[in-house]
Amino acid sequence: MSDWRTIGVLGGMGPAATVDFLQRLVAGVGAARDRDHPRVLVDSNPYVPDRNAARAGGPSPGPALAAMALGLVDAGAEVLAMPCNAAHGWAGDIVAAIAGRARFVSIVEAAVAAVGNARRVGILAVGATLDAGLYHAPLLARGIGIVDGDLAVVQPLVNRIKAGDTGAEVQSAMRAEALRLVTAGAEAIVAACTEVPLVLRQADLAVPLIDTSACLAMATLAAARR
Amino acid sequence: MSDWRTIGVLGGMGPAATVDFLQRLVAGVGAARDRDHPRVLVDSNPYVPDRNAARAGGPSPGPALAAMALGLVDAGAEVLAMPCNAAHGWAGDIVAAIAGRARFVSIVEAAVAAVGNARRVGILAVGATLDAGLYHAPLLARGIGIVDGDLAVVQPLVNRIKAGDTGAEVQSAMRAEALRLVTAGAEAIVAACTEVPLVLRQADLAVPLIDTSACLAMATLAAARR
C-alpha cells in the first residue's frame, strides 16, 4: 500500500491556476522517486457555470461540481481539493454529493488557519467570493478585521490572467492594489483567488501573503498522507 | 457543444513531467476565457510499474496503463495522451484496451513528424526507450541516422530531475551530452524523455531541439479540436 491516499482535484477554474496547484503538490511532496508521490486524479473542467454570473442569477455551478466530485470519488479519489476560491460557495453541494465517501479539503479553512496573528487582513478576490462572504464569516468569527480589495481593480486583472497575461503590467497593478490594502491597515494579504498568486509573490510585499493555492496544497497533502 | 473533445492524460511518469505537459496544453490553447479551454482528465499515477525494470524482466506496466486508459475513457476522455516516452513501449496495451473508443496520440509519431530535414539525430532517452527502439524504428524507416545518448550519463540525470533537482549542474551536464551528440554528427536532438525538457531548452543548442512533450501537446490539441 502507498503512503498516500489518492487525491482528486476539481479543476479548470481556471486551467492555469489548476496547473499551478498541481505544481505545488509535486513540489510539496519533495519525493526522490516517482513512486513516492501520491496518485492524483484531475478533472480540469472549464465548463463549470461561471461563479460570478451565478451570484447574479445565472445557472448554479453546484450540480456540475457535484458530478465532478462523484466522478473523481468513483475513480478512486479519497481526498478532494478544488483550487478555486469562488467555487467554494458551492462546497456544500460537493460535500452532500460525496456523502462521506471522501474528505473535501476546504481552501478557505486552509487559508484562514494560515492567517496567524494579523488583526486585520486584506482580501484580493472576485465578486462571487466577496458576495458569498467566504472569508468574511470565518475571519470575523475569529475577531479579525477585513479590508476588501476593489472589485473594479481585481476582476479585470483576474480576467487578464485567465487570458494568459501574467506580464509586468498585471503584476504591478495587483501589487499596487495589495499595497493600498496595507496602507488601509491590512497586516496580511489573502490572495483569495487562485489566479492572484500567478502574478503576486511574497517578495512583492512587506506583510505576509496568504497564498490560498499553497495553503490548499499543503492541507491536501497533509490530509492525503496515511 | 464545446469546440474541443475531452482530453485524457495518462500521467505520473513522472509527476513533474506531467505538470509540465499540462502547462503546455494550457499555453498551447491560448484562450481568452476559461470556457475556451478543453476539458482535461488526468490520472497521474506514479505507481505504474517501472519501465526500465520491466525491460529487465520486471512486471509489465501494460495492465496498469490499460486500466488507466479505460478509466479515462469511461470518464469521458475522447483523445488520450501519455507524456512519457518509455511507457510508449506498451502503447499497444492501451490501444487494445480502449478498442477504438478514443484516439491515442503517440508521442513518438508526434516527435518524429517534427524532425524535419535532419539526416542524423541524437536521442536523449532512458534505457526502456532505447531498448524498445521506439525512435530507432520510425527514424531509420525514414532514412534518418541516429546517435544514441550515453545511458550512463542520461539515466542518472533523469533520476535527479525526478527527485526535483533541475539545477545548474544537471542542466549543464544534459547540455554537454547533447553537444557531444552534435559533435558526433547529430543535426537535431530529440529530447526523448519528458524529464529532459525540464533542464534542456532550445536556447541551449545551435541545432533544433525536438521537445517531445511540446510535440505531444500540440498533436493532442490538434486531435482534440473539433
Image: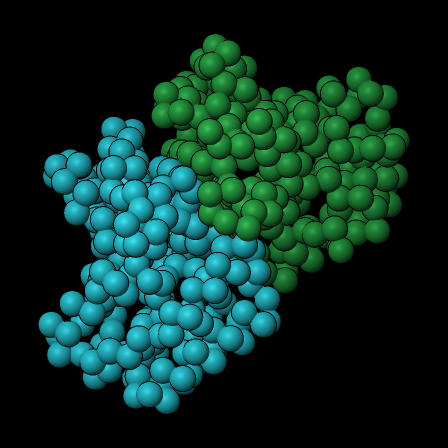
Chain colours: A green, B cyan
Q: Is residue A160 left or right of residue B188?
A: right
Residue found at the very far front of the displayed protein: B57
Is A132 rendered above or below residue A211?
A: above
Is A161 rendered above or below residue A94?
A: below
Q: B126 or B216: which is nearer to us?
A: B126
Residue shown at 48%/59% (left/top)?
B159
Determine the image quadrant of residue A12.
Answer: top left
**Residue B218 horizontal/vertical position (percent):** 30, 58
**Residue B68 horizontal/vertical position (percent):** 30, 36
Q: Is residue A91 left or right of residue A197?
A: left
Residue shown at 55%/22% (left/top)?
A104
Looking at the image, can residue A2 be seen?
Answer: yes
**Residue A205 horizontal/vertical position (percent):** 79, 52
Is B191 rendered above or below residue B225?
A: below
**Residue A197 horizontal/vertical position (percent):** 64, 47
Q: B45 or A152: which is nearer to us?
A: B45
Residue shown at 20%/69% (left/top)?
B136
Looking at the image, can residue A68 be seen?
Answer: no
Is B63 rendered above or below residue B204?
A: above
Q: Is residue B37 left or right of residue B3?
A: right
Q: Is residue B215 left or right of residue B17?
A: left
Count of numbered circles in the view:
0
Q: A181 or A68: which is nearer to us?
A: A68
Q: A100 or A1: which is nearer to us?
A: A1
Q: Quadrant of the N terminus of chain B?
A: top left
Residue shown at 42%/34% (left/top)?
A41
